[in-house]
Image (cartoon, helix red, strand yellow):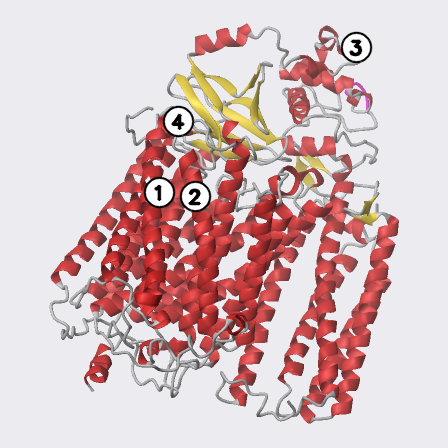
Amino acid sequence: MNSSFQFFPEQASATAQHVDHLAIYLIVVATIFSAAIFMLILYFAVKYRRRSEHERPHATPEPMALEMAWSIIPFGLMIVMFVWGASIYFEMARPPNDAMNIYVVGKQWMWKTQHLEGQREINELHIPLGRAVRLTMTSEDVIHSFFVPAFREKFDVLPGRYTTAWFKPTKAGKFHLFCAEYCGTLHSGMIGSVYVMEPAEYERWLAGGAGFESLVSSGQKLFEYLACANCHRTDKPGRCPNLVGLFGKPVLMTGGENFTADEAYIRESILNPSAKVVAGYQNIMPSFQGLVTEEDLLQLIEYIKSLGQKPESASPATGAIPPALERRGTAGGPTSRSTGRRPEAQKR
Amino acid sequence: MANHSLALRHQFEDVAQQKDASTLGMWIFLATEILFFGGMFCCYTVYRSSYPHAFGIASNHLEVLWGAVSTVVLICSSYFMACSVNSAATGYRKALVGFLVLTILLAVAFLVIEMSEWYLLYKEGLMPGVNFTYKGIDPGHVQLFFCMYFAMTGLHASHVTIGIVILIILAFRAYADVFTPAYYTPVEISGLYWHFVDLVWIFLFPLYYLIARHLQG
Amino acid sequence: MITATVEARDNYLTHEYGVKSWLLTKDHKRIALLYLASITFFFFLGGIFATIIRLELLTPPGDLVSSQTYNKLFSLHGIIMVFLFLIPSIPATLGNFLVPMMLGCKDLAFPKLNLLSWYIFVVGGLFVLYAMLIGGVDTGWTFYVPLSTSYANTYVILTAVGVFITGFSSILTGLNFIVTVHRMRAPGLTWFRLPLFIWSTYATSVIQVLGTPVIAVTLLLVALERGFHLGIFDPALGGDPVLFQHLFWFYSHPAVYIMVLPAMGVVSELVSTYSRKKVFGYKFVAFASVAIAILGFLVWGHHMFVAGQSVYASMVFSMLSYLVAVPSAIKVFNWTATLYKGSISYDTPMLYAFGFIGLFTMGGLTGTFLASLGFDVHVTDTYFVVAHFHYIMVGGTMMAYLGGLHYWWPKISGRMYPEGWAKLSALVVFLGFNLTFFPQFIMGYLGMPRRYHAYPEEFQVYHVLSTAGASVLAVGYLIPAMYFIWSLRYGPIAPDNPWRATGLEWQTSSPPPPDNFEITPVVTHEAYDYSVVEEMTVG
């Protein structure tokens, strides 16, 4: 039994410090208020204790100013709580642009994480010190919640949509990763560790996972295995929209609406293609619901993102081949299909 | 019980207070009912605004003619309920019984139409959870539409059924000459309930049958 | 305290005898006692679950019960305590007993409906008990989808239907109170002469009537979805699990005020009686109740700051949550000011009232922590939240409930409770409570997630403290249960107005006659006018 008392958890991110400062403000305000109230009650209770059954206390004046004062002063202090809390929350909701992306899939009862370089981990997450990390998270089943107390960061992980969280580790070490949203029988077993490593050490760790294929390349294999490229052609106009340069751009639908092609849009278009049909195209794509897992989807999304990395040079009209496709031959697309096995299925 | 002084329950001081209390009670109950349906209307609004296209397509599978007919039937039933309250207030027992019976008959007719529609949807394979075989555009969201349709019309139909039971009891009591111009609160507050049930349908009909029918699969 | 002479008068307890006279009673006082018996049963049942939970958490590994059992224990603890104890607690027992008497009328507006609501409550309770006996439920009291609709393999439908049914009991009680307050007040009893207990009960009733149907329909949808696999909240079909959370908290946040508003009403009565002074700022306290009831409907989103709602929605909900804190603060300040220059006695109910103010203040202040967005992200779904809502619901509501029970016990039973034991138990409850729940604030901030069957070792020291406190608390709750039962037979006969209090309920005999008053009282004074009592007792 660890008998040492501590009142603040480890601070391992920039946000952690901000949250702790806010906490100190909150605690000070609360202590002053409750101390004042308790002292007053105690004082009144002793001073005005009943000394005889025949006491007849007189009504005390009830100045309006007093009522106003104790309504407005606490409210003012609470506005500070609101603004302070909201500014931290706002910061939490906005990952910096240079953040490295890591995918997280929650399922009963484990955390699966995928690095862009292809490393996959279960109930573990290795990240470099000092670099902002953006998590894109989804769940295969029920709602989970990704919680790292040392980072003061928590966000729910929902089935059927992507949520994000980010943090910038400021301290190397091993930290708890918890599932904070009750998710069924082994909820308390859905815990893991976040390892914050010195950048050089992290590079070594990444290199150690040589057997892993990058997400883009797994996604590309999957794209070919599922025969997506038959219709979504990049060399000439196909029956389906060209996906090069698609990611992050607005897309016009047959109904006249515009949607931004983000992760959620791509996910929906794979699982439920008829929900949003791009203007100028027929609703001919079959649904891939049940054929692809959440992890497959993340690989496909990452692949489609990679198609858009050089949108200027690879505009759909010219049909220029983006770098990712140039690697096609070496990645051995057709061979992976001919083996008849799903390319992602080999590992873990 | 024909004597209205007997109808005064002991906790009340006088008949006026009793009538006031009963009427207020019914209004508060209707406020509860609004929130009860409100939860479902809220779901409907969220999903309709999220998936307008699928909901438009799905509403094409509902028979607008039958929806319209049942609306008319229910409005007429509400009209006869108003006539019943009026007859009770003026003390025409025969008219009261007659109007109540008409109200009940139209309510039953409404239920018959609604159940036939349900049956047709079931045969078409558009009843989620029981028989749902729709394979057209956007099946997930279309299923959502029908989930909401059956949940809301089902809840409404259960209210109609409860209403019919209440009306039948009222009709028997009216036949037994319980109500007088001085004491007809049960008729009046049942009327309030019945108009509320009617009003819910007035919202349900356009929301499910009329909006965005031009969207085709 | 005044003692009384024995006098054989017709009262509601002795007016009729036999089981049938109780089960078919339309007397609000008897129905209050039916509720009292049923919710006491559920309280101790929920308490047993809490005890096993605390014992399990004594050691870090999950070694006492299996994780599945643990999940069922905390789910049933939550469901029973929230829906079958706290929500009916003060309104259905003290409220049922007192509302007509405080208004000076013979009964509630709809006595049959009142009895019906008790039966509905019992039927709903039996559903939950049956589900518990055949295997229980493990979704937590929150029934979050899609866990409850697709993944849990326990008796979710049965439990949800049970809660759905008890909801109607709550609605009908609220409806009955609203109509009674509007239409049945004694002559001269204007709105601003009403006791503050009536104001808070009225505000509570409004929440019951407007909030409960929403959770009823939400649970109905969950049951339908689970039964028929409809897909209303199923993300695979485009259904939205977050929508469920919005609907759930639209009721379940105001439900917190269903629990705590009546408690505030009780405390207003106690503070006034035992300092023999009019409640300071009567109108502010009265309108604060109404303000809480209204604002309480606008803050549900603060349960969902990390659930995936938009950043801006979160900001609005955070802001509104601070607004609802203001009327609560106003009440605390006004109670404190009431003591000023009063004549304060330390009878047991007043000790509970002090306890309430202290614990509610701490619960409320930690509530303002949670409304602060950046702070909430870290502590939501941890023991910090658990500690916070136990400070409000157990520290607040339970203290006021016990205080109220002691205060009105002479009126309810016609007997006095043993003062020494009562003071002791008030002290034990207060100390046990703080020892149980204060450590949970700390371990919550350290990151201990809630609903964990097993936990990392560094949290153990706080769990040990908490479990130690829980055993003290259990003793504190058992003592009153025993002496209340004892007092029914052996307690000294209570006088009509042992506390020399002002309410109309004290102007009739103890226990009251079946129709409450020999003659309908006429009110000529404001509430809490102690000069009138002096004249009455002297004259």
With C484 as the anchor, is B111 left or right in this view? right
Q: Secondary structure at mark 2?
A: helix
Q: Label 3 is placed on what type of residue?
A: Thr
Q: Image point 22% across, 70% down: which residue?
A: A62
Q: Which residue is mark 4?
A: A150
Q: Where residue B35 appears, x then y in whole percent?
A: 59, 62
Vertical arrangement, residue B170 with respect to residue B127, above or below: below
Name the foreground residue: A323 vs C282: C282
Q: Which residue is mark 1?
A: C470
Q: Secondary structure at mark 1?
A: helix
Dot 4 and dot 3 residues touching (CB under 8 Å) = no
Q: Where residue C225 appears, x then y in whole percent?
A: 69, 47
Vertical arrangement, residue C18 with respect to residue A336, above or below: below
Q: Label 1 is placed on what type of residue?
A: Ala
Q: CA distance from mark 1 to mark 2?
A: 9 Å
The residues colored magenta run: A233-237
Q: CA distance from mark 2 to mark 3?
A: 56 Å
Q: CA distance from mark 3 to mark 1?
A: 62 Å
Q: Which residue is mark 3?
A: A339
Q: Where residue C61 appears, x then y in whole percent?
A: 44, 26
Q: Which mark is residue C50?
A: 2
Q: Main secondary structure of the magenta part?
A: loop
Q: Label 2 is placed on what type of residue?
A: Ala
Q: Image point 55% across, 87% down: which residue?
A: B8
Q: CA distance from mark 4 to mark 3?
A: 45 Å
